[in-house]
Amino acid sequence: MRLNGKTAIVTGAASGFGAGIARKFVAEGAQVMIADLNLEGAQALAKELGAHACKVDVADSDSVHHMYDAAMAAFGLPDILVNNAGITHLPQAMDNVTEDEFDRVFAVNCKSVYLTAHAFVPGMKTRGSGVILNVASTAGVSPRPKLNWYNASKGWVITATKTMAVELAPEGIRVNALNPVAGETPLLASFMGEDTPDMRAKFLSTIPLGRFSTPEDMGNAAAFLCSDEASMITGVCMEVDGGRCI
């Protein structure tokens, strides 16, 4: 029960890594708001876990502020904010990615971190405490061809995490990130281009531990970084990647 008495928002939590984080947080005693563009999915998981649900488009300012209002009504200013929602473009040459695809990737993966900070950081400063966890990617540490603009967006998240950590540390706010490798989530097929045994084998050959990241792996790492056990840890971008970035 390392998060007993804590409150948390997890974006993109209706499925994948976000759902794994939400499940672990609830198991560790936290009150959780499952925020997702897929309201039906968020409500279903919230019902299962005894959590709250909220529809949010993390790339839209009005929607993020609605999420803030919903959280304040449900349990007040959250102790923990997890920026997990993210998307990618399909694997292709960088000059073939359309401007609309580029804009959407950076809006969801990067602008969302700005928007949630704009909404929640002032209250955390006033309170003198808070934990923010951003979900970046090994793609921002060790990029590979054909996912150029996705890689760049996750590199942005890593840099944002570190600079947020430095600026907000005097305010009592810790900011860390997780860098998962490709995992068993709805985005896996998008990363690979196609979900076939051969393509899976190719991806797995680059991971020394020989398996993908799972929602449970992410939940375990997130629970530690967001708990008081990690009270001296800020600005860390932890690889949850089975050795992929070595």
Image: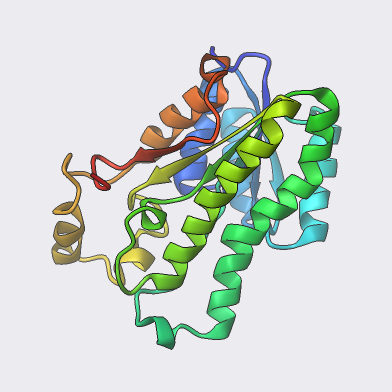
Residue 235 location in percent, x, y? 53, 35
Left or right of 238 in this view: 80: right
**Residue 6 vertical placement versus 213 (above, below):** above
Q: Is residue 154 above or below residue 81?
A: below
Say if residue 60 shows up in the picture: yes
How many numbered circles does the render carry? 0
Q: Quadrant of residue 123?
A: top right
Residue at the image point whose x is 61% and y is 44% from the top: 163
Q: Is residue 21 above or below residue 142?
A: above
Residue at (57%, 44%) from the top-left corner? 161
Q: Position of 73 compared to 233: left or right?
A: right
Depth order, front residue of 162/16: 162
* Position of residue 178 measured from the top left corner of the image (x, y, whole percent): 45, 40
Where in the figure is residue 209, as x and y percent of width and height?
A: 17, 39
Which residue is at the front of the view, 208 or 50?
208
Tell me how the rendering is colored: rainbow
Q: Quadrant of the N terminus?
A: top right
Task: Look at 46% across and 83% down and name the residue there.
Answer: 97
Decide: is 96 above or below 20.
below
Q: Nearer the viewer, residue 62 or 158?
A: 158
Quarter of the rendering occupied by the C terminus? top left
Q: Quadrant of residue 3?
A: top right
Q: Does the image show residue 83?
A: no
**Spot occupied by residue 174 in the image (x, y as percentages of width and height):** 62, 30
